[in-house]
Image: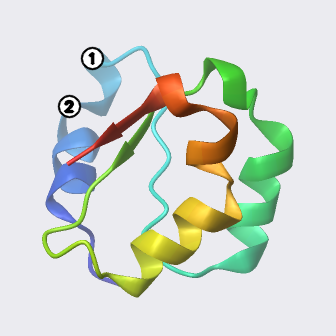
């Protein structure tokens, strides 16, 4: 499995960062369901990144997590 650049940087400096990061970069339904029901979504910042805006994984995960619908103030779209 290849990692995206942001995840690679996080893994490199992870011990110095006190916040937890989760990367939804695939359509792994078990992982996504676990996160959706175990995170306090109101206290979670979602950074949605897509070069084209048409990446199926990005779109599917955004809708599955109901990120924009439930947390519009906790969303940064790049």
At horizontal 56% and vertical 67% (from top left) the residue drawn is: 61
Q: Residues within 10 Å of mark 1 (few under 14, many from 20)?
A: few
Between residues 19 and 66, which one lies in front from this camera angle? 66
At horizontal 78% and vertical 73% (from top left) the residue drawn is: 30
Badge 1 element? helix
Disc number placed over residue 5 in the picture, else none: none
Quadrant placement of the N terminus: bottom left
Compared to residue 14, the image places residue 42 above or below, namely above
Is 6 displayed left or right of 17 in the figure? Answer: left
Q: Residues within 10 Å of mark 2 (few under 14, many from 20)?
A: few
The reply to whether residue 64 is visible in this rendering is: yes
Residue 22 image point, x, y percent: 50, 46
- The residue indicated by pointer 1 is 16
Is 64 displayed left or right of 53 in the figure? Answer: right
At horizontal 68% and vertical 66% (from top left) the residue drawn is: 64
- The residue indicated by pointer 2 is 13
Compared to residue 61, the image places residue 74 above or below, namely above
Work out which residue is located at the far right of the displayed protein and give it. Answer: 37
Residue 35 image point, x, y percent: 73, 50
Residue 16 image point, x, y percent: 27, 17
At horizontal 25% and vertical 72% (from top left) the residue drawn is: 53
Residue 17 image point, x, y percent: 32, 19
Is 77 displayed left or right of 32 in the figure? Answer: left
Between residues 71 and 26, which one lies in front from this camera angle? 71
Tell me whether circle 1 and circle 2 mark residues in contact (CB < 8 Å). Answer: yes
Between residues 62 and 34, which one lies in front from this camera angle? 62
The reply to whether residue 45 is visible in this rendering is: no
Is 6 displayed left or right of 57 in the figure? Answer: left
Badge 2 element? helix
**Distance of label 1 from label 2 (alpha carbons):** 6 Å
């Amino acid at each position: 499995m290849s990692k995206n650049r942001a995840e690679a940087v996080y893994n490199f400096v992870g011990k110095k960062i006190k916040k937890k990061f989760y990367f939804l970069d695939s359509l792994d339904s078990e992982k996504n369901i676990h996160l959706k029901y175990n995170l306090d979504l109101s206290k979670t910042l979602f950074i949605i990144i897509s070069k084209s805006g048409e990446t199926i994984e990005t779109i599917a995960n955004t809708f599955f997590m109901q990120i924009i619908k439930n947390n519009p103030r906790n969303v940064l779209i790049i």
